[in-house]
Image: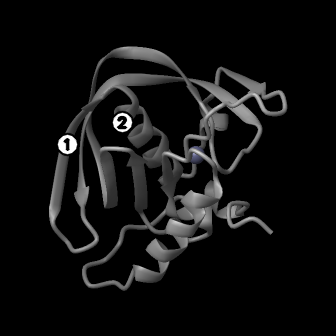
Amino acid sequence: MSMLTHTEIKTVCTPVEPGEDINYIIAKMNIGIREGKDGLGLAANQVGETKRIIMVDNGSFKHIFLNPVITRRYGGTINSREGCLSFPGKTALVVRHKQITMEGLSPTGEKLAFKLKGLNAIIIQHEVDHLDGISCMDKAFKVITNKVSSGEPERG
Ligand SMILES: [Zn+2]
C-alpha cells in the first residue's frame, strides 16, 4: 500500500509542541516525498501524521517547516495548475495568491521567515491548506484527469 493514501488528509493538524519528538514524522515524510515522482512538497497528514509539519523541495528552496503560517497574501491571484501526491493521475485548477509572506520553525527550533512568489508561494499555499484538511481537489474550480504518461507534475 502506498504511504500516501491516508484519510488523515481531511484532518486539521495540531501544532508541534516545544520539545516534541517529530523525527519519526520527518523520516516518514522523507520517504513519502520520494514516492511521488517530481513531488515538490508534502504535508505530515499525507503520511498519516496529524501534526503541523510541511516539507518543500523545489531545487534551491528546500525546507522543513514546523507550525508554518502564511502571514500575508498579496500581489493578486493566478489560476494555478496543480498535482497532489495524494491524488495521482489528477490535476486541479486552483486560484492562488501570487505572493505571500510566511513563517515557521525549523526542525531544530530556529525561526524561519520568507517572502515568496511564483512556484514557491504556490507550494506553501498548497501545503498549508493540507494542514487544515483541505486539498487542491477540494479547492479546485476544475479537476482534470490526466491521460496516462502525460508528464503532469505531482506537486505535493
Ligand atoms: Zn497535495
Mark 2 falls on what kind of element?
helix
Q: Which of marks 2 and 1 is nearer the N terminus?
A: 1
- 51 lies left or right of 18: right
x and y, in percent, of residue 40 in the image: 49, 45
Q: Residue at x 65, y 28 (%)?
A: 92
Q: Which of 146 and 139 is in front in this view?
A: 146
Is residue 98 depicted above or below 114 in this figure?
Answer: above
- 94 lies left or right of 152: left
Q: Which of 15 and 108 is in front in this view?
A: 108
Q: Residue at x 61, y 40 (%)?
A: 154
x and y, in percent, of residue 110 in the image: 15, 66
| Marks 2/1: CA–CA distance | 10 Å
Q: Nearer the viewer, residue 152 or 109?
A: 152
Mark 1 falls on what kind of element?
strand
Characterize the local packing of mark 2: few (<14), some (14-19) or many (20 or more) Cα atoms within 10 angstroms. many
Q: Mark 2 points at which residue?
A: 120
Q: Which residue is drawn at 31% across and 45% down?
A: 61
Q: Can residue 50 be seen in this view?
A: no
Name the mark on residue 114: 1
Q: Which residue is drawn at 62% across and 69% down?
A: 48
The picture quadrant where one finds residue 117 is top left
Residue type at mark 2: give it.
Asn
Residue type at mark 1: give it.
Phe
Q: Specify whether tag 2 is near ligand 1 (CB below 8 Å).
A: no
Name the mark on residue 131: none
The picture quadrant where one finds residue 145 is top right
